[in-house]
Image (cartoon, rainbow, N blue to C red):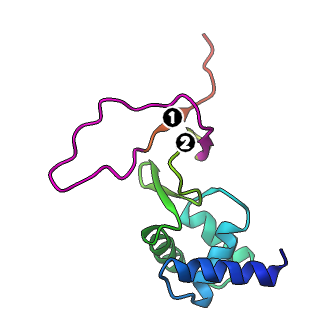
Amino acid sequence: MDSHKASIAVETRVRDAGLRPTRQRIALAELLFAKGDRHLSAEELHEEALSAGVPVSLATVYNALHQFTESGLLRILAVEGSKTYFDTNTSDHHHFFIEGENRVFDIESGPVTVTNLPEPPEGMEIANVDIVVRLRPKRPA
């Protein structure tokens, strides 16, 4: 797909999510979705935007990421304290997190099951369950 068609596809995706396709939103969405499924922090996307010549503030990146999340284009992952990652894969899936590297990647679909979930409070339903398996290098015995 040439870059013009890709840009139109991204603009359509943003518009279909109910967001106004501003120049900054389109530029950020192109950076987010051009490389397939990925996990990015706001700071990482901000750096990519600046490197790509997109003049945007970190606050604008945060706002856009949260708007994309609220509209269903992204999934939010709170993994490490105040560090939040945004996942372009919005399907139900789980993650590995490598401590010390601050790296997140998908657990390929497999034998992960969650049982005995509590009943949600009246008027609420479970939207999804996030499992983050924390990894570190093996320690010598």
Q: Is residue 72 visible?
A: yes
Q: Which residue occupies 50% across, 77% down?
A: 17
**Residue corresponding to mark 2:** 95
Q: Is residue 47 magenta?
A: no
Q: Secondary structure at mark 1?
A: strand
- The picture places residue 108, in percent across and down from the top left corner, at 63, 38
Q: Badge 2, how many Cα within 10 Å: few under 14, some, many 20+? A: some
For the residues labelled 2 and 1, say whether their Cβ atoms are less than 8 Å apart: yes
Amino acid bearing label 2 = His
Residue 17: numbered disc? none
Q: Is residue 110 magenta?
A: yes
N-terminal label among 2 and 1: 2
Task: Out of 30 and 111, give the one closest to the viewer.
Answer: 111
Q: Which residue occupies 45% across, 39% down?
A: 131
Residue placed farthest to the left in the image? 122
Task: Out of 81 and 121, give the one closest to the viewer.
Answer: 121
Amino acid bearing label 1 = Val
In the rendered image of this protein, does residue 73 appear above or below residue 81? below
In the rendered image of this protein, does residue 131 appear above or below residue 139? below
Question: Horizontal placement of 88 versus 53: left or right?
Answer: left
- The picture places residue 71, in percent across and down from the top left corner, at 45, 72
Question: Horizontal placement of 109 versus 5: left or right?
Answer: left
Position of the C terminus by quadrant: top right
Region rendered in magenta: 103-129
Task: Out of 57 and 20, give the one closest to the viewer.
Answer: 20
**Residue corresponding to mark 1:** 133
Q: Which residue occupies 58% across, 46% down?
A: 102
Position of the N terminus by quadrant: bottom right
For the residues labelled 2 and 1, the Cα–Cα distance comes to 6 Å
